[in-house]
Image (cartoon, grey):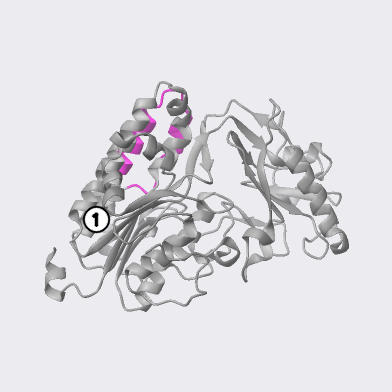
Amino acid sequence: MGLFDRLRGSDTPRVAFIGIDGLSYRLVADNPETFPTLSAIADDGEGGRIDSIVPAESSACWPSLTTGKNPGETGVYGFQDREVGSYDTYVPMGRDVQTPRVWDRATDAGLDATVLNVPVTFPPQRTVQRMVSGYLSPDLDAAATPEELRAYLTESDYRLSVNAKLGHRADKTAFLEHARETLDARVAAFERYVERDDWDLFVGVFTAPDRVNHFLWGDYEDGGTYREELLAFHAALDEHVGSVREALPSDVTLVVGSTHGFTRLRHDVYCNEWLEREGWLSYEGDDHDSLADIDDDTRAYSLVPGRFYLNVEDREPNGVVPESEYEATRAELRDALESWTGPDGTPVADRVVDRETVFRGDHAAIAPDLVVVPNDGFDLKSGFRSHDGVFDADGPRTGMHAFDDAALFVDHPDATVEDADLLDVAPTILRLLDVDYGRTDFDGASLV
């Protein structure tokens, strides 16, 4: 128990949440010797597999995890979103998240929060005790507040993210070194501010595992050159979670969770190339590289990952699908997507989901009409440039996100991680903090 805790007493419950972008529950379950800390948390409390959201893309997942709301309420559907009533697209940032985060609810209740490296939080919020925004931030100087935090991170070689360009090299040595250095600097910062012991809610996110898994998952599943290096990296991650756990005061409940899992990538799939070849999409001229280049004959287009939009009259600027034909046209596209097969005849789609099934809320105007949850092996891209084919098996990435392979561990004896998903994390944290909320405030429910 730390000094501040002893001085103020321990009447107020406190929570530390460690987020891990891309931690696969299957990896943990299949390699318990690599994850002694997570195994211990599961033994002392509860741990298990949870579902991600649709789509299982990090830029959409983190707003949903930290708000307990689906993308129709957060307003963030992926790494690239479409402006309402326009073909212009933008990269969502923290200000685009349209519903309160878990730390906003905590601070509104009079609690203090330290929030380190959560994706899609730039610019940092001045209302939070201390905060450094995660990836999509332009640089560290702009990402951190207050000045003491900014100065420490600058002096300590802290990194906002792993250099993914290094992962494109055949020799992954420099990539792994950079990923490990990023991981080590991240936990050093976590330990420093955990030990300050002046917070009620601590949130810290490791994003390096997602980068490592994208480039080395094929080695893990296929017994390749870097299989043991991937496991060693995750062993270091587990050790770091253990060091944070040991540094926590006795009155703090630890929650560890991931946004999605991982599976083997076999083909990058260019959805707009497929739509063009199937007669759904066409462009003005041969030099096209954005959504704004589609022409008046386009009936459908796609944004990553696996989001399909009809070009609807009075919704899109040059929409051609009449509202009266919306359902019939969507059914036609759904049938085409469900019958779409890869080079070996395997269906590309595990399932095709209608917008109203997974997106609800005040910010559903830019929701896709259909979302494809792909079968393992098919990583759905968009791309408005021409490609030689729809399927590409020669990309540098060998791992892709998996919807049903996220992980959650709660160091509390009353927790139950069963039939859970990403939307349950925020209400669970608030329940552990004894912060009141309404029955309809979340799309998920507390697991405690």
Quadrant in the picture for residue 177: top left
Whole-percent x, y for residue 296 in the image: 85, 52
| Residue ID at (34%, 28%) | 229
For this rendering, which residue is in front, 121 or 35?
A: 35
Q: Quadrant of the N terminus?
A: bottom left
- Three-letter code, disc 1: Tyr
Asked if 369 appears above or below 178 in the picture, the reply is below
**Seen in the image, is 403 located left or right of residue 313?**
left
| Residue ID at (43%, 39%) | 26
Magenta residues span 159-183
Say whether residue 299 is visible. no
Say whether residue 246 is visible. yes
**Seen in the image, is 105 located left or right of residue 82?**
left
What residue is disc 1 on?
Answer: 152
Whole-percent x, y for residue 363 in the image: 62, 68
**Seen in the image, is 14 located left or right of residue 25?**
left
Q: Main secondary structure of the magenta part?
A: helix
Instruction: Give the secondary structure at mark 1.
Output: helix
Quadrant in the picture for residue 166: top left
Instruction: Examine the structure image and report whether residue 282 is included in the region drawn in magenta.
Output: no
Asked if 279 appears above or below 196 in the picture, the reply is above
Q: Quadrant of the C terminus?
A: bottom left
| Residue ID at (21%, 48%) | 243
* Crowding near the residue tagged with mark 1, few <14, some 14–19, many ≥20 C-alpha atoms within 10 Å: few
For this rendering, which residue is in front, 89 or 242?
A: 242
| Residue ID at (46%, 66%) | 445
For this rendering, which residue is in front, 275 or 346?
A: 346
Whole-percent x, y for residue 194 in the image: 23, 59
